[in-house]
Image (cartoon, rainbow, N blue to C red):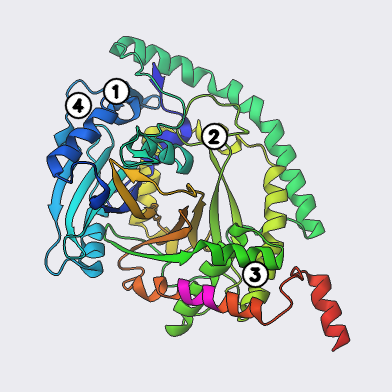
């Protein structure tokens, strides 16, 4: 029997018509590389051939009687590729504006929970008909960043005519038990919760004590509930708006090498600069820095064998209160070092362990009450947005034979944090995907367009100083002392 982990199931309980818990992907393809040429029928059949025996694509949810335990996965005996891979065409002139408008509409549609929780739209007519776009959706209950990449690898190869990579372990379909067995297992699972609680309370208390110690020493990561309020930190609706852009990965790496920082530091600095510019243009720039929630994979450290989501979260200041891009990078890098050290001191399974206590009915009612009462606008802001940085392949990839020229992941948005920025590297480019609640950020392009400009500012700033000197507070103090 394949029971959802508490963390996987939590994404089901968090979902409402406004707070949709699927992750999307916008994949721009060059069909000219497909052996034998492109046709929708052939692509749909090829996708079916690759996923029809893969459990993650062909399983559906089955609820436990009375909602006494988390749901289980069972094989969908009526699985049909035509229910999952659809065909659309862009309206004329088939440019970027038409594409993101259509993608925004598709992102706002919920997945059908009576079927396997994924869909793809093959969108034709992009850029005058020269390009084909795949818009994909998969529920967060089935994937996190790493497992999502592994699932897509069932459809991607390193050569146009090569077999897909199919990364990660091959799962099997769980047994479909009877109602009595499900009910009995649910009762036993609930009886075991006090034992589970006793086992995780001690390490949790120890972790909190270490957090207090780090806070007193000034080496703790940024704390939630300390973010400034912005126009995108409130109750969200079900409308979505999307923007995507590319930046040069090699330029990011040059900045990283010249400043002694990391690619993730540079990515967060770019996001901070773009958000600063966006808010400044609107006259909304807060005095204190925005705070981002950054998902972190704990797949290698986790002791849990099952579950699609194996993540934790750290909180990072984005330096939006700092105008100079190099000073912002220094502060972000310094903050990230503390956050990583702090995060490593916390159990990798803390989030998964406590998520087991998420009660299906209670959790769902609480989320609906939270939204209905608009509580996100009444308490201190937990975090301003979510930012994910997903490493991708350094080589060209081919989706069913078509070369991938754009790969833009798009995560969910939440009440209280109506913007999500996800960055993925692929073949020398950083693909930036931004999704927002339309009422929270009506013009996503006003944010997206600042990413290349912020990278140019960083590159120019590095060129104007000694590129071999890492940015550190000590070096900065010495330079000021000499002046």
N-terminal-most mark, 4 or 3: 4
* Boundaries of the magenta span: 451-456
Q: CA distance from mark 1 to mark 3?
A: 46 Å
Disc 1 packing (10 Å; few <14; some 14–19; many ≥20)? some
N-terminal-most mark, 2 or 4: 4
Residue 427 among magenta residues: no
User: Which disc number belongs to residue 329?
Assistant: 3
Q: CA distance from mark 1 to mark 2?
A: 28 Å
Q: Nearer the viewer, mark 3 or mark 2?
A: 3
- Element carrying mark 1: loop
Query: What main secondary structure does the magenta stretch of the protein show?
Result: helix
User: Which disc number belongs to residue 460?
Assistant: none
Viewer-closest of 356 and 429: 429
Viewer-closest of 464 and 369: 464
Query: Which quadrant holds the N terminus?
Result: top left
Q: CA distance from mark 2 to mark 4?
A: 30 Å
Q: CA distance from mark 4 to mark 3?
A: 49 Å
- Residues under numbered marks 2 and 4 in contact, where contact means CB atoms less than 8 Å apart: no
Q: Which residue, given by chain and number where applicable, does mark 4 sit on?
A: 79
Q: Which residue, given by chain and number where applicable, does mark 2 sit on?
A: 352
From the viewer's perspective, tell me whether residue 96 is left or right of residue 306.
Answer: left
């Amino acid at each position: 029997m394949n029971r959802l982990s508490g963390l996987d199931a939590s994404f089901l309980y968090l979902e409402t018509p406004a707070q949709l818990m699927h992750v999307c992907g916008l994949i721009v393809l060059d069909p000219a590389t497909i052996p034998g040429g492109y046709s929708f029928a052939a692509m749909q059949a090829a996708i079916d051939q690759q996923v029809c025996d893969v459990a993650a694509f062909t399983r559906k949810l089955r609820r436990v009687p009375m909602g006494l335990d988390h749901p289980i996965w069972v094989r969908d005996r009526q699985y049909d590729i035509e229910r999952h891979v659809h065909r659309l065409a862009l309206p004329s002139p088939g440019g970027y504006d038409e594409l993101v408008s259509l993608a925004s509409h598709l992102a706002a549609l919920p997945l059908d929970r009576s079927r396997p929780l994924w869909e793809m739209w093959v969108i034709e007519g992009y850029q005058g008909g020269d390009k084909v776009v795949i818009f994909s959706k998969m529920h967060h209950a089935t994937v996190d960043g790493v497992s999502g990449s592994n699932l897509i690898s069932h459809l991607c190869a390193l050569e146009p005519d090569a077999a897909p990579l199919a990364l990660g372990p091959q799962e099997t379909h769980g047994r479909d038990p009877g109602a009595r067995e499900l009910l009995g297992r649910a009762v036993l699972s609930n009886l075991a919760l006090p034992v589970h609680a006793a086992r995780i309370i001690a390490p949790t208390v120890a972790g909190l004590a270490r957090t207090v110690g780090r806070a007193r020493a000034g080496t703790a990561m940024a704390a939630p509930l300390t973010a400034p309020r912005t126009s995108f930190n409130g109750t969200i609706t079900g409308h979505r708006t999307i923007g995507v852009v590319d930046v040069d990965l090699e330029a990011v790496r040059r900045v990283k090498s010249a400043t002694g920082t990391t690619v993730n530091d540079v990515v967060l600095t770019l996001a901070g600069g773009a958000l600063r510019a966006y808010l400044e243009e609107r006259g909304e720039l807060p005095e204190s820095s925005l705070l981002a929630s950054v998902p972190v994979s704990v797949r290698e450290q986790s002791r849990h064998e099952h579950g699609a989501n194996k993540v934790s979260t750290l909180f990072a200041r984005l330096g939006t209160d700092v105008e100079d891009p190099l000073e912002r990078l220094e502060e972000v890098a310094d903050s990230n070092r503390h956050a990583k050290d702090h995060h490593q001191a916390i159990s990798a399974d803390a989030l998964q362990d406590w998520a087991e206590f998420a009660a299906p009915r209670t959790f769902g009612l609480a989320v609906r009450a939270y939204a209905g009462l608009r509580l996100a606008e009444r308490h201190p802001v937990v975090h301003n947005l979510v930012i994910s940085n997903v490493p991708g392949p350094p080589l060209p990839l081919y989706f069913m034979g078509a070369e991938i020229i754009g790969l833009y992941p798009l995560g969910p948005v939440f009440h209280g944090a109506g913007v999500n920025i996800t960055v993925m590297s692929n073949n020398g480019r950083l693909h930036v995907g931004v999704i927002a609640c339309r009422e929270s950020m009506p013009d996503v392009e006003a944010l997206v367009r600042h990413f290349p400009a912020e990278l140019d500012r960083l590159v120019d700033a590095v060129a104007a100083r000694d590129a071999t000197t890492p940015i550190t507070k000590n070096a900065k103090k010495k330079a000021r002392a000499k002046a």
